Image (tube, grey):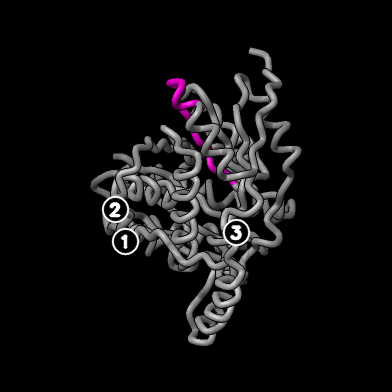
Amino acid sequence: MEASKKEPLIITDKEQMRKWSRTMRSQGKSIGLVPTMGYLHQGHISLVKEALKLTNLTVVSIYVNPGQFAPSEDLSTYPSDFHGDISKLMSVPGGVDVVFHPHNLYDYENDTKRNKNDKGACKNLEGKGEEVSCLEESGMGHETWVRVEKLENGLCGKSRPLFFRGVATVVTKLFNIVEPDVAVFGKKDYQQWRIVQRMVRDLDFSIRIIGTEILRDNDGLAMSSRNVHLSAEERRKALSISRSLLGAKSSAENGHVNCRELRDSVIQAVSEAGGRIDYAEIVDQESLQAVEEISSPVVFCIAAWFGKVRLIDNIEIKL
């Protein structure tokens, strides 16, 4: 099938986005949403292709969310290429219908007084040793957060305690603005996918959440927008992540189900390659609670630093 070169409608305003969705739904059309932070790669495109199979219309959101970054993290250096993103989306057979590209989802009009007060409150929180996000540091006045309290605690939540609060909140905002029937997420961000699933269940969103398999480059590295920051040498060393995860899965399938031994083998392989481990955990696929021995479906999740780039990856194990 030839590429469609269908040019998407670009919407930047929240009310216009909601109006478009409601108009389409009134015509009996179903809507799929693919939330992204832009700098799209083939992993994102695979999410779009999945959405195209499931609904009549597809919306891709492109928004780098300040609510999920701490001031010490890489918000200011997160890569972007909006025109390149549009070109990639236009190359998808069938094309996408809308790109929702808001400038600021936390810009609440006529609220400058609260913004100033909130900036002060943010400084007070910092003075008490409480962590704040880039959103709070900016003093925009936003003070409502969505938390999935148990699932957010482990794995990435240990070293990024604000991250999933920010993710759950911005996804809630996108769901309320776009009003999709289906939303598609990648399983590379496994904890994020499970958190969104649980949030949708607990808050009765009428949205079907789809998780798609990790897409990898030919060398095995999980696709990520942050990979662009890896040097050639760092990238070569980072291949130890996917290779050691595959080795752990093979070992488990051959009867080696002791999680400590499997974790140690992966930690050793990645560390010897020059990676700095954030975490390496084998957890239940639903609860994300650590297990000692594999007797039910688990997922082996890892986060590691190579140079200044933090990479995450995982592999599902079902015996």
Select label 2 or label 3 by which is in front: 3
The disc label shown at residue 308, or none: none
Q: Residues within 10 Å of mark 1 (few under 14, many from 20)?
A: few
Dot 2 or dot 3, earlier in sequence: 3
Q: Nearer the viewer, residue 60 or 102?
A: 102
Q: Nearer the viewer, residue 57 or 76?
A: 57
Q: Secondary structure at mark 3?
A: loop
Amino acid at dot 3:
Glu
Select label 1 or label 2 by which is in front: 1
Per the image, the residue denoted by label 3 is 109
The disc label shown at residue 287, or none: 2
**Residue 16 drawn at (x, y percent):** 58, 39
Q: Does the segment drawn in magenta span residue 181?
A: no
Image quadrant occupied by the C terminus: top left
Select label 3 or label 1 by which is in front: 3
Q: Quadrant of residue 234?
A: bottom right
Which residues are the magenta region? 24-36
Per the image, the residue denoted by label 1 is 150
Q: Secondary structure at mark 2?
A: loop
**Residue 86 drawn at (x, y percent):** 70, 34
